Image (spheres, rainbow, N blue to C red):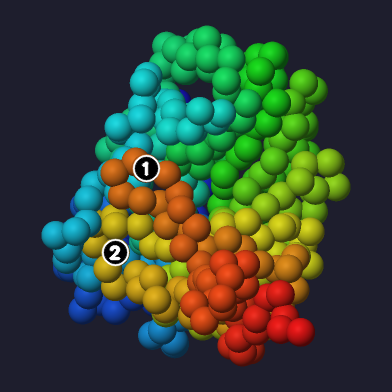
Amino acid sequence: MSIVKKLESAAAATLRQPAELVARGLVSAQDLAALELVAARYAVAVTPAVAALIDPNDPADPIARQYIPTAAELVAEPIERADPIGDAAHSPVEGIVHRHPDRVLFKLVHVCAVYCRFCFRREMVGPGKDSALSGEATAGALDYIRAHPEIWEVILTGGDPLMLSPRRLAEIMVELAAIPQVKIIRIHTRLPVADPARISAAMVAALSVKGATVWVALHANHPRELTVAARAACALLIDAGIPMVSQSVLLRGVNDDAATLEALMRAFVECRIKPYYLHHGDLAPGTAHLRTTLAAGQALMRELRGRVSGLCQPEYVLDIPGGYGKAPVGPNYLMRDQESPTESRYRVMDYCGDVHLYPPQT
């Protein structure tokens, strides 16, 4: 049995079947047949920490909307695709995505503690897929990184790389930190939210390597996810000298209002986590019910600009389908003044929506 499968077996209380969700009162029994079809295609996992956050009496609960399967996932739109951000087009060897010159994604595992209903890798992760890279593939991925002196940053993703045991994670971290050109190792995870008890002293020690600077990017989408336990898990990492940034996805019915985004970004900053990215929803199959429009996202970012300080401002980004990378898609506050007799005057919009000339007229 693999390391990851042992860890999954140990998490016996995690809800993985629609019948278990019915038994916990998280979904209606009348929906069971449809949800069985969803679970046959897309992985389901709801940890005790996440299940405890869900209000079963609220049909619009924003936590449930992220983690509990619905029949809407069976409806795929023509514009959706199995690999919406084009990982495969930039994968020179198994486990590596090399889209940008100075950094690579290193996909060590294909399992998570929880499975988001909007996951852009939902066709590639979960039960029935390979749980982790083989030893041979891992060695090949490390060799690829060693052979490319332009690689300054390695981003551990998957799946959730913190699903690995501390021992195995430490081995990978030491190997990466020993590569001369690798100066930054970034870990993308949901674990401090999904299973905060797993952020142990042993896990923190595994991430604390010499030879490279380690960053952790936490994925959370609603302020209720930042529980006392989640905050304590993040504090263990930060107090050990590991800086953290946030990643969130703009989701309809979860955080697509200014008050929720404000509370989420403030909560990150209070936890010493710098807001980094607010992702526009990717075109993953069966996720249309969770996506907003770009116009709605831009309007929310305008509103957020007037509500919170720069510390709380994430960058609103779209991962361009086909593997072309992220592009900032936030609102534009600057436009050339067409009435100016010169080309050196602009119109600048403030957070209230008022427009001003720059330089000001004398």
Q: Quadrant of the C terminus?
A: bottom right
Tell me if residue 221 can be seen: no
Tell me if residue 143 can be seen: yes
Identify which residue is drawn at 72% across, 35% down. 214
User: Which residue is more in the foreground, 356 or 103?
Assistant: 356
Query: First in sequence: mark 2 or mark 1?
Result: 2
The residue tagged 2 is 287
Label 2: few (<14), some (14–19) or many (≥20) C-alpha neighbours in 10 Å: many
The residue tagged 1 is 324
Identify which residue is drawn at 45% across, 38% down. 158
Q: Position of residue 360 (x, y in %)?
A: 72, 81
Q: Is residue 213 left or right of residue 256?
A: right
Q: Position of residue 126 (x, y in %)?
A: 35, 43
Q: Amino acid at mark 1?
A: Tyr
Q: Position of residue 290 (x, y in %)?
A: 35, 71
Give how far apart the Cα atoms at labels 2 and 1 are. Answer: 21 Å
Number of numbered discs visible in the structure rendering:
2
User: Which residue is more in the foreground, 271 or 16?
Assistant: 271
Q: Is residue 175 left or right of residue 239?
A: left
Identify which residue is drawn at 62% across, 72% down. 345
Q: Amino acid at mark 2?
A: Thr
Q: Quadrant of residue 295?
A: bottom left
Q: Quadrant of the N terminus?
A: top left
Do callouts 2 and 1 mark residues in contact (Cβ within 8 Å)? Answer: no
